[in-house]
Image (tube, helix red, strand yellow):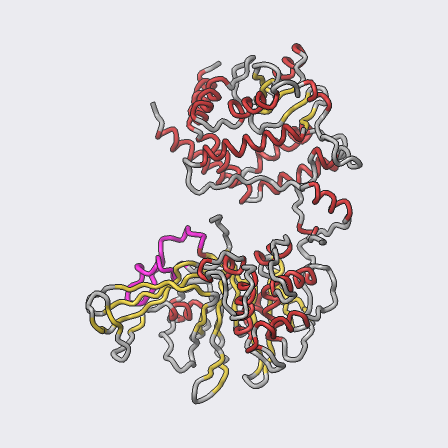
């Protein structure tokens, strides 16, 4: 694993150990619901389901179709806020 | 009992119990391949997996998860990591490392470490086994409780609604679905005037369009404990059913009128009554009937009215703070009283009006129009919350000075209700004359109550409000959703109302006649009762 990957892994470890990862997930969930992103994604999922048919569609179909759209539609303000939180956390736990 | 099905959320689309076997609702939703897993002590094993690797609640499990949850093939912690259910193996889903493991070892079940879903490699999809789902839900709740103690403001974890067996049955027996579009007129219905009952009709229109109240009744949240048939809350519930039934003919509210006459005797009779009085009386009766207590023969209530948590109190009750300051020792005596509405004096009334904010300085606290000299709602609120010298004839016994002293009194909002109702005191009933004050008062679509809060009091100097830095506080922002107007004189007048249907669609309700209205129509109207709804709702 290269240096960047190792850094990511370390950060992830710290976030998981302290439970901060779960809290951040909930915060993100709330923010994405507030700004309507969740509803947009639901609508997109419905489109895919209509396309593929209710009896044949799999979770994988949805993941493949929705993931790129979902990533693109996250508002910058939400990204900023999460990054801020993570940065603050890292500053606090710098060792 | 029929439930209002059009309110059902749209997420009931894909669930194992819903789509797979509609003819046998009791059949397990998962796949048969889990049967190979469900042997011996599988429940406990599964719980351990959830606790250790999916939703780690304790510090120890979190540490273990942080260290061990990486792909056994490539070491990554991302890529939708899955754990094999049959052995200790973690593998990426995206890179198909877990798929390889499943094929090689013939271990055909894995669990998604991010969301806890169970994947079957034979079915090639996530499956929803009822027993396993139950365990997942419990473990998730347990873990969340442990994590959330460390953070403020995040309470019970939000879980999406899942229909119960009974609800699924109701869905099957009632296949008709109603789609709510932006232009639909559902919820709009005229009300027949039963003889000067427009005062009641306009309030009913306002109440049936109060979002939280509507949601309460359409979700059948009222459990009636009254023995007789005279529960006003039940009647309100019925009224909501009528309004959202889709019938376009006007409704005849004779039962409602009869109940009002029974419970609020002072409003009985076919004379024109005051809409504001009716509002307060209606809220009072609803509040009493909500508690489900039976009023015995003496008319005594069994519950403490100050600690009620009924829907009426939740929505309409605010707290008004009254501070009396002794002019000698400057000691402050504070009381907080509950209120359902704020009655505001208008210019032209016997009591002198506070100097108007100069129209020329362009100050627009709430974006109201200052057609030079016209009064705004904010002006009225400013006047309502200004410190008032009580004069030498009204000395207060001061607790600090132990004697009667002159004092000033000031009213501010301690706690804001979710729905704020402003009553413009247009009807003057003084000893000398009875008249209607028709002064135009402009009111805004969006209102920020921050300047009138008890907490903002300190930022006032010389009675002039200084813009608070606390602009980020969304908790005090309100949106207009209903306006009740009175046309005519005290002797013969007529009430109508404007109500907001969707974000920017307004309708005029004139008894049985409902017409589309523009925002300008609404804002140009005289205004007698103004209903504002909080823009942001916080959990308790």
Residue B484 image position (x, y, % from top left): 56, 71
The percent position of residue B124, horizontal first and vertical second, equals 70, 22
Q: Which of the two residues, B123 or B227, is positioned nearer the viewer here?
A: B227
The reply to whether the magenta stretch includes residue B494 is: no
Residue at x-position 66% and y-position 63%? B239
Residue at 59%, 27% (x, y): give it: B116
| Residue B447 in sight in this render | no
Of B409 and B299, which appears nearest the observer?
B299
What segment carries the magenta color?
B450-475
- Which residue is pictured at 33% across the width and 67% down the height? B410
Residue A20 horizontal side relative to residue B247, left or right: left
Q: Is residue B471 magenta?
A: yes
Whole-percent x, y for residue B102 in the image? 65, 14
Q: Residue at x 47, y 82 (%)?
A: B428
Q: Quadrant of the C terminus of chain A?
A: top left
In the picture, residue B152 is in which quadrant?
A: top left
Q: Which of the 4 image quarters holds residue B432?
A: bottom left
Q: Residue furthest top?
A: B104
Count of numbered badges drawn on the protein: 0
């Amino acid at each position: 694993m290269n240096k960047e990957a190792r850094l990511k892994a370390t950060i992830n470890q710290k976030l998981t150990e302290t439970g901060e990862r779960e809290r951040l997930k909930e915060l993100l969930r709330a923010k994405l619901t507030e700004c309507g992103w969740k509803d947009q994604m639901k609508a997109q999922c419905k489109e895919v389901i209509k396309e593929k048919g209710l009896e044949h569609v799999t979770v994988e179909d949805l993941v493949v179709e929705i993931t790129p759209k979902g990533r693109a539609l996250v508002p910058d303000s939400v990204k900023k806020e999460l990054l801020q939180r993570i940065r603050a956390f890292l500053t606090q736990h710098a060792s | 009992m029929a439930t209002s099905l059009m309110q059902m959320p749209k997420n009931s689309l894909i669930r194992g119990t819903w789509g797979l076997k509609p003819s046998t609702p009791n059949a397990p939703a998962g796949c048969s391949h889990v049967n190979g897993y469900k042997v011996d002590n599988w429940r406990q094993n599964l719980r351990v997996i959830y606790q250790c690797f999916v939703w780690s609640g304790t510090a120890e499990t979190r540490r273990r998860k942080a260290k061990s949850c990486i792909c056994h093939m490539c070491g990554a912690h991302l890529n939708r990591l899955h754990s094999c259910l049959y052995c200790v193996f973690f593998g990426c889903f995206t890179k198909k490392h877990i798929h390889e493991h499943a094929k090689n070892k013939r271990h055909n079940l894995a669990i998604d470490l991010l969301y806890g879903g169970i994947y079957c490699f034979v079915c090639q999809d996530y499956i929803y086994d009822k027993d396993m789902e139950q365990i997942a839900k419990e473990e998730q709740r347990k873990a969340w409780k442990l994590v959330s103690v460390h953070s403020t403001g995040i309470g019970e974890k939000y879980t999406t609604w899942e229909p119960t067996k009974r609800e699924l049955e109701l869905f099957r027996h009632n296949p008709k679905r109603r789609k709510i579009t932006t232009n639909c007129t559902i919820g709009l219905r005229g009300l027949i005037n039963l003889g000067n009952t427009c005062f009641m009709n306009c309030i009913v229109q306002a109440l049936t369009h109060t979002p939280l109240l509507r949601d309460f009744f359409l979700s059948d949240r009222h459990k009636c404990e009254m023995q007789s048939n005279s529960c006003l809350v039940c009647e309100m519930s019925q009224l909501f059913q009528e309004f959202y039934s889709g019938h376009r003919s006007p409704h005849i509210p004779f039962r409602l009128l009869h109940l009002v006459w029974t419970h609020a005797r002072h409003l009985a009779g076919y004379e024109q009554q005051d809409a504001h009085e009716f509002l307060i009386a209606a809220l009072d009766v609803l509040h009493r009937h909500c508690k489900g207590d039976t009023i015995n023969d003496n008319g005594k209530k069994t519950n403490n009215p100050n600690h009620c948590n009924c829907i009426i109190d939740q929505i309409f009750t605010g707290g008004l703070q009254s501070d009396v300051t002794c002019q000698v020792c400057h000691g402050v005596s504070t009381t907080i009283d509950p209120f359902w509405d704020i009655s505001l004096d208008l210019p032209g009334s016997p009591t002198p009006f506070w100097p108007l904010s100069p129209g020329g300085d362009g100050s627009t606290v709430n974006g109201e129009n200052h057609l030079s000299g016209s009064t705004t709602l904010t002006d009225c609120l400013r006047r309502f919350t200004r410190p008032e010298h009580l004069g030498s004839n009204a000395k207060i016994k001061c607790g600090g000075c132990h004697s009667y002293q002159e004092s000033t009194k000031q009213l501010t909002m301690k706690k804001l209700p979710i729905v704020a109702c402003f009553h413009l005191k247009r009807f003057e009933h003084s000893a000398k004359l009875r008249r209607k004050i028709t002064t135009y008062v402009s009111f805004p679509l969006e209102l920020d109550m921050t300047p009138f809060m008890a907490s903002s009091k300190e930022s006032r100097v010389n009675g002039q409000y200084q813009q608070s830095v606390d602009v980020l506080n969304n908790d005090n922002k309100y949106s207009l959703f209903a306006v009740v107007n009175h046309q005519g004189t005290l002797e013969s007048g007529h009430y109508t109302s404007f109500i907001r249907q969707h974000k920017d669609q307004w309708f005029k309700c004139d008894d049985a006649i409902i017409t589309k209205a523009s925002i300008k129509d609404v804002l140009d109207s005289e205004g007698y009762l103004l209903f504002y709804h909080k823009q942001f709702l916080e959990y308790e």
